[in-house]
Image: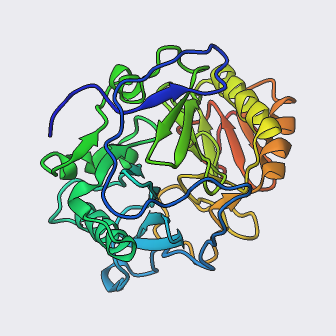
Amino acid sequence: MQRRDFLTLTAAAAVVPVQSVLRAAVPAPGPRIDFKRADAAPGAFPAKWICGSSSLMDNQDPPVQVHWYNPHTAILRQNKAYSYEAPFAPLYFGNDRVLLLDEGFTQLRTDWDLRGVVDDCIAGWCRRNGRNPADMELLVAFSHLHADHYAAVNQFADRPNTRYMGLTHEEMLGFWGMTNFPEQRVSLDLGGREILIWGSPGHVISECAFYDSYTYILFTGDMFYRGRCYISFWQPWFDSMQRLIRFVDTHPVSHVMGCHIEISNAGVDYPYGTTWQPDEAPVHMSVDDLRHAFEIAKTIKEPGIYFTGKVFLCNQTRGTTTIDRNPYRYD
C-alpha cells in the first residue's frame, strides 16, 4: 500500500475555517447512489448484540457480529468472548470509498479474521450495487489511540487499494488533513456521502468525533458512550462536550453512538473485564442523553464517578470502576 497524501478533504463549518483539498476522488464504475437526503436515511439497530457467554470455552457465536443498519451502513461488534472490550466498528459505504472506523482488539488473522469479514461486507455490497470490489478504496481509521481500536490495522497492511491510519497523533491528524486540532472540522467525501470529522479529546488527547450526513449518526468513540467514560483530561473533555452540544444545536442527529457498552438495561455497571453481558443496554443514545450528561458535567468540580442515568462520567478515575473502593466520591 502506498503512503501518500490522503484523499479529498474540505473544511466545513469549522471554528477556524481551513480549506484542504488534497486529491480528487476517482469515480467507481457502476450506477451512482444518491446519498443526499432531506432527512436521515432509515436504519435499525439489532434487538440484541452478541455479548459473550457465561462459559467462554463453550461460546458458539462468531468473533464479530455484522449488523446492516441499512443497505449502505454496517456496524461490526467484536464478541466479548474474544475480548472484554468488545468495541463497535461502523463501516460506511460511499460511491467511491468505504470507511472502517475502529478495528477491534485483535492482531493476527489466524486469531480472527477481521479483514476477511470486512472484505465479505464490501463484496456483498458491491454485488448488490453492481460494483467491482477492486474499484472501491478502503480507508482504515480509528477514533482514538487505544489498542482495542487500532490493533487489527496490521491485517490490512498488504491489502490492495487501501489506506490506513498511522499510530501517532501527527499521523492521525495528517490522515484527515487537519491543521487546527481539535476545533477544525473537516469533510471526508466517500463519493456522494459526507463524513464530518473534528477533534474530541478528553478520554485521550488523540481522539475524534464523526458525523455521517447520510444516517445522521454521531459517533463519539470512547469520549461518550454507554458505560464508563474514562475522562483522563477534564478540561479538554468538557470542551469536547461543548463542541458536541454546539454541533447538535445546528445539525440533525438521529443517534449518538459510542464504541462500547458497559452497562445493563437497569443501569447497573458491568465490572471491568466482564466477558458476559446478558442484559446490556443498547449502544445508541439520544441527543437528550448527551444534553443531560452535559448538564451534569457542568456541576462537576472534582475527581469522582458521576452517573447520568445512561453514562458513568469517570473524572480522572481511570484505574478504578464503580464497584471499587477508592478515595473519590460517587454521585
| Horizontal arrangement in the rendering, residue 295 relative to residue 277 (left or right) | right
Horizontal and vertical percent position of residue 321: 60, 48
- What colouring does the structure picture have? rainbow
Q: Is any atom of residue 179 visible in this view?
A: yes
Rendering quarter of residue 127: bottom left
In the rendered image, the vertical position of residue 171 relative to residue 88, given as above or below: above
**Is residue 182 left or right of 110 when viewed as pictured?**
right
Instruction: Tell me if residue 331 can be seen.
Output: no
* Viewer-proximal residue among 21 and 316: 21
Q: Quadrant of the C terminus?
A: top right
Residue drawn 32% across and 65% down?
122
Residue positioned 54% across, 42% down in the render: 195
Name the residue located 73 percent from the left edge and 50 percent from the top edge: 253
Residue 36: % across, % down: 62, 53
Q: Is residue 209 above or below residue 12?
A: below
| 185 shown above or below 153 | above
Residue 310, position as x, y percentages in the image: 75, 55
Q: Quadrant of the N terminus?
A: top left
Residue 285 lies left or right of residue 318; in this view the side is right
Q: Residue at x 63, y 72 (%)?
A: 44
